[in-house]
Image: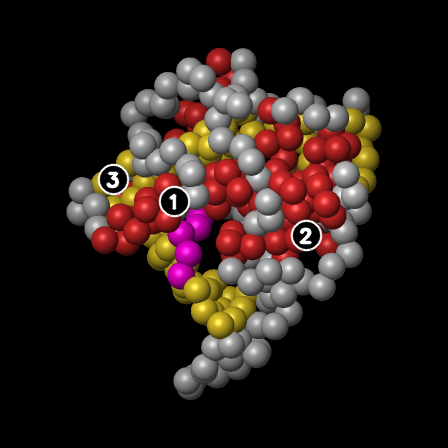
Amino acid sequence: MRPILCVGALTMDTIFRLDRLPDGPGKVIPLDAVEVAEGMAAAQAASIARLGGSAALWASAGDDGIGDRLIAQISGEGVDCSRVRRVTGGRSGFSSIFMDRTGSTMIVPRYDPDLMAAPATAPDLTGFAAVMTDVRWPGAAALALAAARAAGIPAILDADMAAVDILNRLVPLATHIVASESAAKLITGEPTPEAAARALLGTADFVAVTAGADGCWWSDAGAIRHTPAPRIDAIDTLAAGDVFHAAFALKLVEAAPMSETIAFASTAAAIKCTRFGGRLGCPTRGEVEEFLGR
């Protein structure tokens, strides 16, 4: 299978699971904790590999020890990290994430502006099946989406929350847009995910708006369809959107029917939400298919 190039964020996350989020200063002992290489694009690439696909990552990291560990972890998932840009003197991205028993989170990230400088050119896309970008490295995302269109392969945009000018810059470059509920509202001004999905019709070959437990609204021959989310007891929603995007991209390049693609992505994301550890909770393809009864 030809690989999917994932473009964007790469950060080292320290995730603390607490009984409840703190309501003031003091010392809090976590129920559990894990350090994991994530960031939207990195989590998507690792999840594609976990689901049985092939992925490469185009991201930025510093030339520090954190950068070494980031690349080691993502490479260890079977992702090609040869395109990760190492910025001399740069400090790799990291964040502290606090999560309660229900999965509600408080996220404190730190990004070095030098890492987000736009690259001069897009990478060679020869041999790739698709490109998927997040919104965290917009200069690279714009280059990659335009290059994917020129190469005649899917240019997939994970439209998550960002400055509206970044979203307005990237949306017209994508062939496939999968937007979070909050970002879709920002882009369109519509109050509901269904209305936002309708407003996005025509901006790309395919559009979808994800709304967590409320499911996904997606385009089908000029109409908007709805796929409910599986009913689960969520304990950790961190990286659920990344798993959804990974599963979506994988089934898209496999040319599966879109109804099957959305169901597969929704199920993969739902299973992830039952497991602590961010992207480490991504299921295998077999687990998703078993859940779907195939």
At 74% across and 59% down in the image, what residue appears?
Answer: 232
Q: Is residue 124 above or below residue 117?
A: above
Disc 1 element: helix
Disc 2 element: helix
At 52% across and 52% down in the image, what residue appears?
Answer: 279
Disc 3 element: strand
Q: In this orientation, does residue 200 appear?
A: no
Cα–Cα gap, marks 2 and 3: 34 Å
- Mark 1 or mark 2, which is nearer the start of the sequence? 1
Q: Which residues are magenta?
A: 35-40
Q: Nearer the viewer, residue 105 or 162?
A: 105
Cα–Cα gap, marks 2 and 1: 24 Å
Residue mark closest to the camera, 1 vs 3 = 1
Residue 180 drawn at (x, y percent): 63, 45
At 40% across and 61% down in the image, what residue appears?
Answer: 35
Left or right for 207, reference 54? right
Q: Which residue is mark 1?
A: 76
Cα–Cα gap, marks 1 and 3: 18 Å
Q: Which residue is mark 2?
A: 270
